[in-house]
Amino acid sequence: MSEDFDYIVVGAGSAGCVLAARLSEDPATRVLLLEAGPRDRSPWIHLPIGYGKTMWNAKYNWCFHTDPDPGMNGRRIYWPRGKTLGGSSSINGLIYIRGQREDYDHWAALGNTGWGFEDVLPYFIRSEGNQRGASSYHGGSGPLRVSDIGAKHELIEAFIGGANEIGVPRTDDFNGASQEGAGYFQLNTWKGWRCSTAKAYLGPARRRPNLRIATEAQATSVVFEGRRAVGVRYRQGGMSRQARGRAEVLLAAGALQSPQLLQLSGVGPRPLLERHGIPVVHALPGVGENLQDHLQIRLNYECTRPVTTNDQLNSWLGQMRIGLQWLLFRTGPLAIGINQAGCFMHALHRADGTREAATPDIQFHVATLSADMAGGAVHPFSGFTLSVCQLRPEARGHVRLRSTDPFEPPEMQPYYLSTELDRRTNVAAVRAARAIAAAPAMRPYVKREVKPGPEASTDAELLEFCRNHGATIFHPSGTCKMGSDALAVVDVRLRVHGLAGLRVIDCSVMPTLVSGNTNAPAVMLAEKAVDMIREDAMHG
């Protein structure tokens, strides 16, 4: 079976929904959007706190695991990824962060002309519908809704106060002129509901006759004629199907599955393809290399006062109260998700006290609840969590085919904590969290440190804690990187080097990981790509 379209978008995630919606704005353009997962019908997707449920639900989540990582004492790290309309924007922690100006200026300095901060800012603004309205840094009328956390929380106020006391300023905008500071996050929510890219972009586009959305349709390979991509093979309802893309095939399957699909299709490192008996369409050694991710280290605390979300969730009365808060006012814990506050600060300092990095090198996610793992059952005591992550890890891992079966997850190896800088930064991040917890503003709320606990005090002991308990904060990137060097996979217009009719448009194209959460940058990438696709089509 074969059908003809102008564009085929593979993956209805943070980037794919944007691409399909924007390209189908032209009624003369036929677009097919392929999504391996089902429609986003679960109420847990749309309720902000629901990602505690979707975190482990194999219907809406790929539930990947890395290979045993030597830097994590051989542990396999759980890597959730969205498997539904909206992709990971339907199951993530809702946090709206763009990264630092310097991240994008660094991309440009690497030779990626057109990707400096001033080049990408208009696309962040175009996508954003901020509750606060339009400004020089923000959009007020874009489809992706961004909202403030309405009510202040005394525990969060204490955290911000503690950060202030160790020299970190308070901020009310991590996406303004400077990222540094401690304050409340803004979230991708609107009136108490999650605003995924499926809701924001596909919602208004779904009924267009020139857009076909195929769910439970997993791409198995890109179809080539010579070195031109002309279509996609996929499986849906137990049947093999094929769609033809007259103009272009756009891979937006994410940093794990875009490189996997390229490798399955004969595009990637020659030795890997030959080892699996895959005919080489185009040898590109960088496909699947350059994998980067943010490692989160979670410090759990028992609180002296019954003011945490643990207290509410651990009693029927508390559950009823937060349920009514949401039903009547669309406020409270159900409308927020898990992490309310953040902090971007400097962890590493030289012997003379000066900062090692020019910009903040760690990020906090602060939750008024505690659990053994993200999305896990809350502890039976009053608890809160200070989660820290290194913003710009040096470690580089890879994604490689394990077999020619497109339904078997690829090998994923992040090589966490494999460099001296990464090890030093993570230990310094734990010490920074402890410094805030010990500050006068926080001290009245800290009954005890549950993890890592007082038995871990030396650098070696804290590093061992990071190895034994560290986890992903869900930002794999970089595996089809943009550039012109030997490991680059796409050019500055996101076209795959050496091939025609094929682009990659998702976090895999990031040459270096941005300093923060990756959902907003993925949306920006797609918004910018749409303009480039239209320009290239116009000029033949």
Image (cartoon, rainbow, N blue to C red):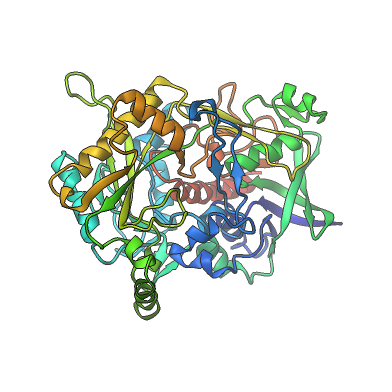
Residue 360 visible in the picture: no
- In this view, the residue farthest toward the right is 1
Residue 334 visible in the picture: yes
**Residue toward you, 4 or 163:** 163
Q: Is residue 301 above or below residue 94?
A: above
Q: Quadrant of residue 259?
A: top right
Q: Is residue 6 above or below residue 268?
A: below
Residue 359 at x, y percent in the picture: 29, 33
Q: Quadrant of residue 18?
A: bottom right
Residue 273 at x, y percent in the picture: 76, 27
Q: In the figure, is residue 242 to the left or right of 426? A: right
Q: In the figure, is residue 93 to the left or right of 286? A: left
Residue 437 at x, y percent in the picture: 22, 44
**Residue toward you, 199 or 224:** 199
**Residue toward you, 471 or 279:** 471
Q: Is residue 177 above or below residue 67?
A: below
**Residue toward you, 89 or 538:** 89
Q: Is residue 224 above or below residue 204?
A: above
- In this view, the residue farthest toward the bottom is 328
Question: What is the quadrant of the C terminus in the image?
Answer: top right
Q: In the figure, is residue 268 to the left or right of 518? A: right
> Which residue lies at the image location 21% right of the left edge and 50% below the top edge?
160
Question: What is the quadrant of the N terminus in the image?
Answer: bottom right
